[in-house]
Amino acid sequence: MGAKVAAFLISVVLVIAIAVLGLFFLLIALNGYSESDVTYGFAAFGILSFLAAIVSGAIAAGIAHLMTRREFKAFGSILAGVAAAFIFGVVAILVTSGLAVGITEYARNNF
């Protein structure tokens, strides 16, 4: 139980840190847009980043659970779960950033 919780919390914190870093890059990428258009992109980025963090935590907890059930040590289980969840989280944040820019461009052209 402790390995699952630790893997979940560590991976959620890491993905949130990557999301904050992605937010700074998103601020630079959306520098020329008006504030009313960027609001939609930031909202989408925030919601999707939160979902990516929760899903990556669930992935880490699931991997830690499966590995501890198969008699692996807790530290190795946590490490493997967090590594897999971190890779998923980075890819998810990159996709989320692209979607946020696309949503902002859509809002600029259609609203």
Image: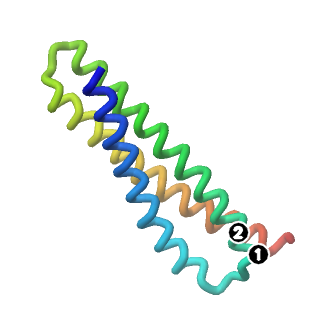
Residue found at the far right of this picture: 111
Q: How is the image coloured?
A: rainbow
Proximity of marks 2 and 1: CB atoms separated by less than 8 Å: yes
Residue 40 lies in quadrant: bottom right
Q: Judging from the image, what secondary structure is the residue with disc 2 in? A: helix
In the figure, is residue 92 to the left or right of 67? Answer: right
Q: Amino acid at mark 1?
A: Ser
- Which x, y percent locates residue 66? 29, 19
- Which x, y percent locates residue 34? 72, 82
Which labelled disc corresponds to residue 59? Answer: none
Q: Judging from the image, what secondary structure is the residue with disc 1 in? A: helix
Residue 6 lies in quadrant: top left
Looking at the image, residue 48 lies above or below residue 23: above
- Which x, y percent locates residue 85? 35, 41
Looking at the image, residue 1 lies above or below residue 15: above
Quarter of the N terminus within the rendering: top left
* Total numbered circles: 2
Mark 2 crowdedness (10 Å alpha carbons): few <14, some 14-19, many ≥20? some
How far apart are the two marked residues, 2 and 1, measured between alpha carbons?
A: 5 Å
Residue at 22%, 18% in the rendered image: 68
Q: Which residue is mark 2?
A: 39
Residue at 29%, 40% in the rendered image: 82
Looking at the image, residue 11 lies above or below residue 2: below
Looking at the image, residue 73 lies above or below residue 12: above
Mark 1 crowdedness (10 Å alpha carbons): few <14, some 14-19, many ≥20? few
Residue found at the far bottom of this picture: 32
Quarter of the C terminus within the rendering: bottom right
Q: Amino acid at mark 2?
A: Thr
Q: Which residue is mark 1?
A: 36
Residue at 81%, 74% in the rendered image: 109
In the figure, is residue 92 to the left or right of 4? Answer: right
